[in-house]
Image (cartoon, helix red, strand yellow):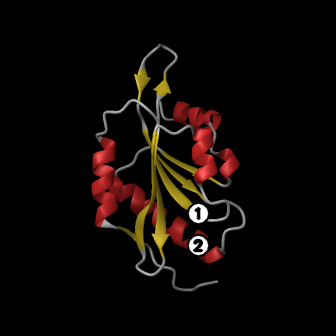
Amino acid sequence: MSANVSVCEMSQEVIDLLKKFKLRKEKNIAAIVLKIDKATLKIIIDEQFEDIAIADLQDELPPQQPRYVVLSYVYKHDDGRVSYPLLFIYVSPQGCSPEQQMMYAGSKTKAVKDAEFTKVLELRSLEELTEESILEKLKQFK
């Protein structure tokens, strides 16, 4: 186990992209997948998806590596209203290296604070990333 795992910073590119992403006008599900660059200890952009289904997003994530996912979701309320909450999802699947898990877990709080997220989900497997689990979590944030 690594004794000196650092808390990683968001790259300026990510900060700028997240500001734009928060203000997006599209009315579909979109996601930005972020990863940690071990060489620079920066949180960087891995992939971006526009108009993606949650099942497809699940398929796009690496099965044995942690990732942060910023998700713009289409939430249909029981009373007929529609909102577009922004979620920060930390996915840390089983089988990740302990060093990777520590880097992502140790950097999550700072990333959430820096990007000013209020809806944060932590998932221990890719199978947990489903429409049902997202809806269940969103109900907790009312």
Q: Quadrant of the N terminus?
A: bottom right
Q: Residue lying furthest bottom in this view? A: 3
**Position of 109 relative to 1 (above/below):** above
Question: Looking at this view, is 29 or 85 the one in front?
Answer: 29
Residue annotated with mark 1: 66
Amino acid tagged 1:
Pro
Residue 91: where, in percent of width, then height?
59, 56
Residue 98: where, in percent of width, then height?
65, 74
**Position of 16 relative to 128 (above/below):** below
Element class at badge 1: loop
Q: Residues within 10 Å of mark 2 (few under 14, many from 20)?
A: some
Question: Looking at this view, is 126 or 2 the one in front?
Answer: 126
Q: For this view, does 26 lie left or right of residue 28?
A: left
Residue 114: where, in percent of width, then height?
33, 59
Amino acid tagged 2:
Gln
Q: Which mark is residue 111?
A: none
Q: CA distance from mark 1 to mark 2?
A: 7 Å
Q: For this view, does 42 lie left or right of residue 35?
A: left
Mark nearer the N terminus (1 vs 2): 1
The answer to whether the residues at label 1 and label 2 have Cβ atoms under 8 Å apart is yes
x 62%, y 45%: residue = 129
Residue annotated with mark 2: 100
**Position of 39 relative to 45 (above/below):** below
x 52%, y 16%: residue = 78
Residue 62: where, in percent of width, then height?
62, 60
Question: Looking at this view, is 42 or 140 the one in front?
Answer: 42
Q: Residues within 10 Å of mark 1 (few under 14, many from 20)?
A: many
